[in-house]
Image (tube, grey):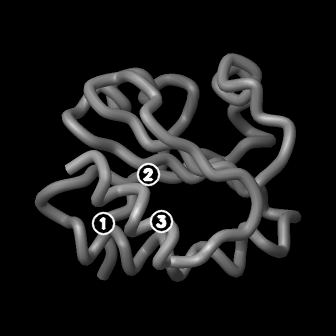
Amino acid sequence: MNFVEELNDDNYNEFINREISLVDVWATFCGPCKQLMPTIEELSIEYKDRVSIGKLEGTENRNTVTELGVRSIPAIFLYKNGEIVDRSVGMTTKDNLKQMIEKHL
């Protein structure tokens, strides 16, 4: 079981206004996005009570993707109280994502 929330244009703003939240912008056609998905799920378990983790399918949620200025995926955004405090674009490692999260806890 994992704790990744499915995000969309309608619930995105509410989700990012939590204390700390990580968003994975992905697409079904994206190979690196699919490779990263198990890592995102593992992080959702490891940080269950400290970080909200969600994924936003980019092709279905164009309004949010446009607002974020996403041009490449996977794109990871880390929010603290609604403000972007860090980001990662392209394939990355679990260790890199953990470091990104730990800096802001």
How many residues crowd mark 2 within 10 Å: few (<14), some (14–19), many (20+)? many
Q: Nearer the viewer, residue 59 or 25?
A: 25
* Residue plotted at (28% across, 50% down): 52
Residue 18 lies in quadrant: top left
Q: Nearer the viewer, mark 3 or mark 2?
A: 3
- Mark 1, residue position: 3
The Cα–Cα distance between marks 3 and 1, rounded to whole angstroms, is 16 Å
How many residues crowd mark 1 within 10 Å: few (<14), some (14–19), many (20+)? some
- Taking 67 as reference, is 50 above or below it? below
- Mark 3, residue position: 97
Find numbered disc 1 in the image and state the secondary structure of the residue it sits on. loop
How many residues crowd mark 3 within 10 Å: few (<14), some (14–19), many (20+)? some
Q: Nearer the viewer, mark 3 or mark 1?
A: 3
> Identity of the amino acid at label 2?
Gly
Residue 83: horizontal and vertical position, in percent? 39, 23
* First in sequence: mark 1 vs mark 2: 1
Residue 101 lies in quadrant: bottom left
* Residue plotted at (78% across, 52% down): 73
Image mark for residue 54: 2
| 44 on left or right of 10 | left
* First in sequence: mark 3 vs mark 1: 1
* First in sequence: mark 3 vs mark 2: 2
- Taking 23 as reference, is 28 above or below it? below
The Cα–Cα distance between marks 1 and 2, rounded to whole angstroms, is 8 Å
Find numbered disc 2 in the image and state the secondary structure of the residue it sits on. strand
> Identity of the amino acid at label 3?
Leu
- Taking 13 as reference, is 77 above or below it? below
> Identity of the amino acid at label 1?
Phe
* Residue plotted at (36% across, 72% down): 43
